[in-house]
Image (tube, grey):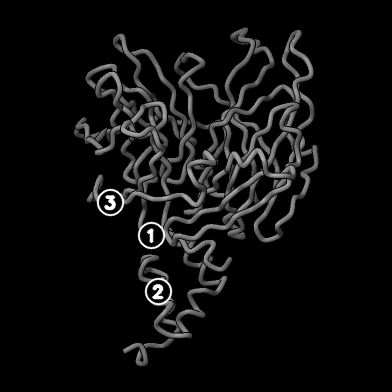
Amino acid sequence: MSDYIPFSIQAEIMKRLPTKSLLQFRTVSKAWKSLIDSSKFVVDYSVNHTHQKHLLVSYLALENFETKYVSIVDDDTFPQPKVFLTTPIPQVSMPIILGSSQGVFCLHSQGDPNKPGNVIEFVLWNPSIRKSVALSVPDVSDLNDGQTFIAFGVCPRTSDPKIVNINFHILSTLDDTIFSPWQVGVYTLSSRAWRSIPTVSHSRNTIQLMQNQVVVDEFIYWLAVDHRTNIRTMDLWSYMIVSFDMTRERFMEISLDLPDAIARDNVALFKLKESLVVIKAVKGAGKLVYGVWMMEHGVPNLFTKLFTINTPDASIINVLGFRANNEPIFVKRADDDAHDIFVHEIHSEHLCFGGISGNGISYHSLPYMETLLLLDH
């Protein structure tokens, strides 16, 4: 039948098919395999935002205290079906998911202490096509002297995965905390090499990054602390956001002066509808509720409150993120040992059980979309 359809039309049809079908079609003919494996098709397929969306949930199982990874299709069938996945890094190496971008995850291995050489083990993993690429990256920082932050993102302009390594040292804490100039290196999959970023593009030396990292479009965002004294509030430090433009490879500072008076803890960054959102815990009727603010149209310092995450009791342990339909996902206490994942249906105020029980502090949830990235590596 395909003989009667122009090959260019066949290619357009294939761009809209799920990855599972495309992997099967690679065995149909040499022409189809050549098309699907081509770098252009991989990139064109990956920028199509209509593909199937999933949630990757990791948690510590109560029965054996092993970390489990489960993929849930994020559509009307949620929370079914669930598919348990095996990461390309074995459990014995204690894998850590650094982040996700355009359907690709970056995992960091603690490594083998008996292995010679000063290297950091990374694995790029695309669970949609069961493909991974291992990277033995030279350690460009002294991990025993200073603080190191490692971030991951896929540049949407080039579809090139990037690892960003930021290292700095504490110089003074007498008045304002002062840090040394950042040492920043960028590692790209296409080059398999590090490049240093000029210090002119770095943030001020009173800013300390935190581990919370989110990728939205071409930007990597971190929650950060500015240790300069806030003249208005006389606080010794305040929250802010630092972004890294993966295209221009420059940093930018974003103010986080939201209207509600909020304690310094329980602040996190997330991605919602291709936009950056901030979640802050506030006191409400004797319990914690969670306010959600979105950065409007990607404009720094312009945040609008969307809604509040609230439940009939005070048992929310942690907010994990959002589904594709905007519904927040959070961990709720079940008993002294187990903590269950729930989804809060905003309009009906109904709580939907996610069918997963584990250790509450171990939960992580990352959304991802089906992609072919890494297929041609």
Residue lying at 76% horizontally and 8% vertically, measured from the top left: 174
| Residue assigned mark 3 | 75
Circle nearer the N terminus (2, 3): 2
Looking at the picture, how far across and down is residue 179, in whole percent?
75, 23
Q: CA distance from mark 1 to mark 2?
A: 13 Å
Q: Judging from the image, what secondary structure is the residue with disc 1 in?
A: loop
Work out whether 37 lies above or below 90.
Answer: below
Q: CA distance from mark 2 to mark 3?
A: 21 Å
Displayed quadrant of residue 142: top right
Residue lying at 31% horizontally and 44% vertically, measured from the top left: 325
Marking on residue 134: none
| Residue assigned mark 2 | 14
Circle nearer the N terminus (3, 1): 1
Work out whether 32 lies above or below 149.
Answer: below
Three-letter code for the amino acid on which mark 1 is drawn: Thr
Q: Residues within 10 Å of mark 1 (few under 14, many from 20)?
A: few
Left of 150 or right of it: where is 21?
Answer: left
Three-letter code for the amino acid on which mark 3 is drawn: Asp
Which of the two residues, 284 or 39, is positioned nearer the viewer here?
Answer: 39
| Residue assigned mark 1 | 50
Displayed quadrant of residue 291: top left
Quadrant of the drawing holding the N terminus: bottom left
